[in-house]
Image (cartoon, grey):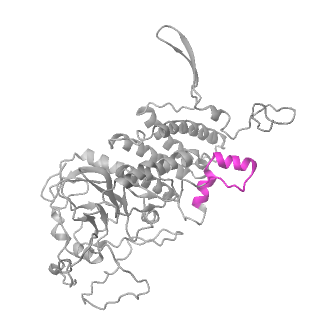
Amino acid sequence: MSSPLIGISKSNSTASASGRSTKSYDSIKVLGAFALGSLRVVCHDDPPRMSSGDDGDGGPPPLDPPVSAPKPKRQSHSRSPKNVMAHSLGGGDVVVVLQMPKDYIVGYDALAFTATDFAGVRGLPPGAHFFWAANSENTSSRSGFWVMSSGVDRVHVIQWHKYNEVFVQPTRTETRIQAENVDEIFPDLPFYRDPTATSALRGQLAWSKIEANQHMWEQLSSSITQSVLDRLTAEQDGAWNVHTGDRVYGAVRHPSELDLDRRLKHPVFQSHEIKFCFRQQDRTYDVSTLGRDRTVNATDTTSYVLAAIDGSRHNLTEEDVVGEYQFAYIVGMYLGNDACIQQWWHTTLALFLRAYRLAIRRPKLVAGVFRTLSAQLAHSSSWLETSILDMNEPNTRDLRIALIIYKRRLNELLEAMDKERITPAHIDVGNAFARVQAFVTTDLGWDIDGHYLRVGKLNLEDGEEIELGMDELQEEDERGEWAPEIVELDEEGRQIGLVSWSD
């Protein structure tokens, strides 16, 4: 679909109705490849600027009161992005996009379309929202940004950098000017629910499609909060911008990521590092433990996940863990960010589907993970052109095996519990996992039932009958590679069958 909205450019501050800005971008001569305001010299020792009136010094606007009180027993040092101000037009938050080129592919949340001119949207519901854009002729790299909508009529301003083809933060002055004059473009801004609808045009999307899109996005992003975005994008100053070329901190870079760096159009572009709390290179067990404890922790990541939540290093909540999981999928699939896709696979296979005891210790967290996983698999299958399962066949095979094993362990743990100890939260884990099982059974044809047939006979076309065996779960029969093994020793106590270079 195409949006009829006329794009907007950066303002001429001499025409500002308030007259509080005495300098104009049009009156300043600059040289260089970077947009005005993208580079700033900051001295942290300077005292804060104070203003007693409308002196036109272009200082920062006064801080708005907090939308809601912080959650109890949780410390947060995060601040709202610098490009947020309030408006008085009603209808919810507004996103204003400056200097967006024509005929670009634009997407937000569960929608994507080719926009003739795109200047933003209005009527954002409260919560996290993700916007992205890409050149229609070259979709190998994409840029996106996150918005936390307050639902109390705020203006979020973002700017497109034409040279680097990325979203950047405008200056405070530009943000203030756009917020003060948002009433001039407000009637022409499309509605969030339906980008084909404005004040003068009736939308083309069916109501059922609108509801389906909103319901899907709520499932994909329900646990993404401001604290999650602040921690993941800590390298940036007051911005939640992401790009196809962004890296995951502490992860090994794959050949596809290195190839993308070489193919980026503008070599001056600097990618960022996304800092997930679960690093791919971390050891999931404590080397100081011995015997059975080390074996249990090496084959079950519950202790590792609990240490990350309860430890003081990250100050995480259960919602934060699910929020990072959702962030990895959204940024990975929407922007084609290989690093985030690998992080999603790592979190799914190496952590969550191996944290068997976590279903008993933290059932609310596990239920949230499986509800998110079922939504991600459904979204990837029906909302996107390429499923995340189609992008990595070995990992997809491992996912099927991991689900089979997890169901076995989950049933064993629940059956071993006393009925008095089973809570509604534990039952919710089973229901959430059942949603995942229903999808993979119906849409993928996987059989993850606990009684998995591994040996059987097959009749060929010529009538010959052969016996086939599947060794996919052979290690599971002995509870993995850590199980004891019986070997034969010689007279000197050495294992028979090994090659010795001393003989």
Q: Residue at x 49, y 49 (%)?
A: 369
| Residue 94 in sight in this render | no
Q: Residue at x 34, y 40 (%)?
A: 382
Can you say which quadrant of the picture contains the C terminus? top right
Q: Nearer the viewer, residue 5 or 257?
A: 257
Q: Main secondary structure of the magenta part?
A: helix
* Left or right position of 484 against 186: right
Q: Residue at x 57, y 60 (%)?
A: 309
Point out residue 60 in the picture as x, y percentages from the top left corner: 32, 81
Point out residue 62 in the picture as x, y percentages from the top left corner: 33, 81
* Left or right position of 390 against 459: left
Quarter where residue 163 is shown: bottom left
Q: Residue furthest bottom?
A: 52
Q: Is residue 491 above or below residue 186?
A: above
Point out residue 132 in the picture as x, y percentages from the top left corner: 30, 56
Q: Is residue 53 above or below residue 428?
A: below
Q: Residue furthest top?
A: 463
Q: Residue at x 54, y 56 (%)?
A: 279
Q: How many marks?
A: 0
Q: Which residues are magenta?
A: 283-309
| Residue 340 in sight in this render | yes
Q: Residue furthest left?
A: 200
Q: Is residue 305 magenta?
A: yes
Q: Nearer the viewer, residue 341 or 34?
A: 34
Q: Nearer the viewer, residue 427 or 195?
A: 195
Q: Is residue 213 above or below residue 90?
A: above
Q: Is residue 256 above or below residue 461?
A: below
Q: Nearer the viewer, residue 372 or 131?
A: 131
Point out residue 72 in the picture as x, y percentages from the top left corner: 51, 69
Q: Is residue 384 magenta?
A: no
